[in-house]
Image (spheres, rainbow, N blue to C red):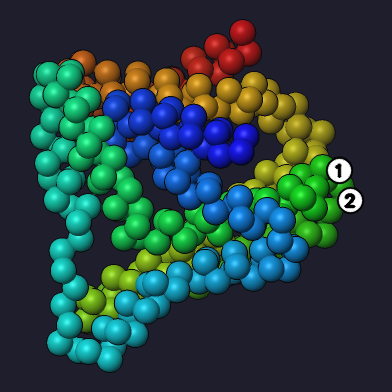
């Protein structure tokens, strides 16, 4: 019940964040986090099998084979597009309250429906279960004792990422039927992203154990401890910088300049977290 209460609080915080940033992820986490309640008392093998099945994107495979068996089938337009088209104009308008209202309705529906259309529900549930298993096995505690596990994760992730990356790029040439292409892109991107995540996490684990890099990475600890605060303030400050109700800098800042803004905001937040 305490975990369910925390998910409810996370949902409320996500709604607050979504009022400023229509790409909020917290509401999705609050919804999907409920799946951990029924599985938390399962044995590790059952949880792992469930996580693997979810990571394989069963709904997307069903869409793919249905389209294969019915060549004339044309998938309908995805629902998230409708809410995206409704929401987007309010981001450039000067009315703050009109933007808030739009983000809380069309923005949240856009975010949730997009996540459903691109397999994020199943992938996120799988990652939550895998994270629970990693925590129960204490694989982030006494990292040196689990060096073999993390080395395997690094190598397997790196080896798998490369073919998945190039296969994803080649899919439009391999599948002409869009009704087959769309679910397969979701499946392959899910595998590709998971492989890259394994590389990132395991590489971070190894860097954490090195004397030369440990001190640098240890400086990020306060930032991680205040990750929710940082996530929320990024949305508030970022929306004020870019959206129409604030400075409206979306008209002037390109990719490189925005990258610089992101670095500056990160540095300022890091200093605040240390304070």
View extreme (top): residue = 275
**Residue 222 visible here:** yes
Is the C terminus in the top left, top right, bottom left or bottom right quadrant?
Answer: top right
Residue 49, image quadrant? bottom right
> Against 106, is 151 above or below?
below
Residue density around tag 1, few if under 14, some if 14–19, many if 20 or more, within 10 Å: few
Look at mark 2 in the image and give the residue it sits on.
145
Is 166 situated left or right of 110 in this image?
right
* Residue lying at 35% horizontally and 57% vertically, measured from the top left: 116
* Residue lying at 22% horizontally and 75% vertically, measured from the top left: 178
Near-viewer residue (155 or 193): 193
**Residue 260 visible here:** no
Look at mark 1 in the image and give the residue it sits on.
142
* Residue lying at 55% horizontally and 54% vertically, measured from the top left: 35
Please state the horizontal and vertical placement of residue 88, each as a whole percent of the image.
Answer: 15, 38
Near-viewer residue (241 or 15): 15
Give me the C-alpha separation between circle 2 and circle 1: 6 Å
Please state the horizontal and vertical placement of residue 236, each as a whole percent of the image.
Answer: 35, 20
Is the N terminus in the top left, top right, bottom left or bottom right quadrant?
Answer: top right
Near-viewer residue (77 or 198): 77
- Mark 2 and 1 residues: CB-CB less than 8 Å, in contact? yes
Is 99 situated left or right of 136 in this image?
left
View extreme (bottom): residue = 69
Please state the horizontal and vertical placement of residue 118, each as a whole percent of the image.
Answer: 35, 60
């Amino acid at each position: 019940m305490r975990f369910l209460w925390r998910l409810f609080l996370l949902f409320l915080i996500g709604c607050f964040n979504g009022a400023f940033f229509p790409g909020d992820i917290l509401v999705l986490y609050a919804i999907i986090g409920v799946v951990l309640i029924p599985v938390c008392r399962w044995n590790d093998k059952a949880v792992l099998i469930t996580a693997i099945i979810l990571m394989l994107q069963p709904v997307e495979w069903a869409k793919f084979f249905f389209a294969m068996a019915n060549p004339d089938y044309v998938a309908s337009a995805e629902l998230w597009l409708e809410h995206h088209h409704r929401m987007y104009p309010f981001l450039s308008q000067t009315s703050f309250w009109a933007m808030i209202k739009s983000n809380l309705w069309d923005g949240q529906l856009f975010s949730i429906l997009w996540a459903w259309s691109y397999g994020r529900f199943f992938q996120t549930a799988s990652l939550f279960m895998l994270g629970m298993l990693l925590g129960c096995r204490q694989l982030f505690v006494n990292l040196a004792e689990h060096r073999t596990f993390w080395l395997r994760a690094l190598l397997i992730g790196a080896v798998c990422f490369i073919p998945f990356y190039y296969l994803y790029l080649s899919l439009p040439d391999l599948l002409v039927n869009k009704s087959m292409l769309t679910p397969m892109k979701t499946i392959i991107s899910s595998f590709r992203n998971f492989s890259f995540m394994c590389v990132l996490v395991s590489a971070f684990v190894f860097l954490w154990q090195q004397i030369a890099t440990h001190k640098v990475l240890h400086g990020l600890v306060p930032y991680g401890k205040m990750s929710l605060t940082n996530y929320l303030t990024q949305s508030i400050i970022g929306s004020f910088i870019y959206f129409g109700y604030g400075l409206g800098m979306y008209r002037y800042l390109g990719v490189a300049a925005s990258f610089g803004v992101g670095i500056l905001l990160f540095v300022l937040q890091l200093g605040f977290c240390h304070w």
